Amino acid sequence: MKTISFETEEPVLASRKRVTPDEKASVREQKKHLKRDRIKAAAKELFSRQEYEKATVREIASQAGVALGTISLYARDKRDLILLAYNDDVTDMIARGAKACRSDEPFEDNLIGFFQVFYEAYVANLQLARTYLQVNFFSYGINSKALAQNRQRKLDVVAKIVRWGQRRREVRADIKADIIAMQLLLLHSSAVRTWVLEEHPSIVDGLIEMRKLIALQTQGLNPQSN
């Protein structure tokens, strides 16, 4: 009888792909971004339903599913957490407000069109807006750079509106547009902080008041008034 022999195949081990240092760094960055997003979402949710004094960093950490000490990697303190929660929203407001402005529109109409976006967004989440406007006078934390960048973006948009007004001879041309823009932003900052503290802030009433204040300012800027 002929014996049939079978060859035994050696098991082939699947080769493992070696992860490069760059890929490891990319994974770490992705995890950081995801953790930051969770903290940001938790802070935004908490500050949207609680007053600033009542909200705690510990509660935000718990809701985000991170250790309390981890918060310090993304925000210096509770004030800084407000900026983390709201800076991106403000960036979006500025972009949308800028799109509402046109070089062929009257000076005051352009300003109101720009500021209207902020009034609408603040009313949409009044508690968060009140807290943000309460604490963003200054910042020295991790998210202060984004706050400063937003202030510069707002200044740039309003300065552009001023330059359009100067070309249309609605605004004095012997004063730098940046200086006039700064004055207008300070005016708006004061007006909106007063408005947002009303029990039921009205967008229409807020914009009417803002237009009156702008008109009062521009009477001194209009070259025909001299």
Image (spheres, rainbow, N blue to C red):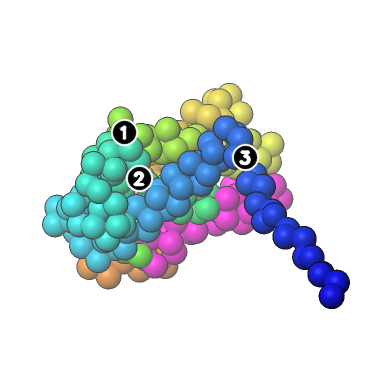
Q: Give the range drawn in magenta.
A: 95-124
Secondary structure under the numbered disc 3 in the rendered image: loop
Instruction: Give the number of the mark in front: 3 or 2.
Output: 3
Q: Name the residue under label 1.
A: 141
Question: Going by the picture, which residue comes out furthest to the front?
Answer: 1
Q: Is residue 11 visible?
A: yes
Q: Which amino acid does label 3 sit on?
A: Arg
Q: Which amino acid does label 2 sit on?
A: Leu
The N terminus lies in quadrant? bottom right
Q: Tell me if 121 is positioned left or right of 80 in this view.
A: right
Residue sitting at x 79%, y 65%: 5
Question: Going by the picture, which residue comes out furthest to the left?
Answer: 54
Q: Name the residue under label 2.
A: 83
Q: Name the residue under label 3.
A: 18
Circle 3 crowding by C-alpha within 10 Å: few under 14, some 14–19, many from 20 = few
Secondary structure under the numbered disc 1 in the rendered image: loop
Secondary structure under the numbered disc 2 in the rendered image: helix
**Between marks 1 and 3, how big is the CA–CA gap?**
39 Å
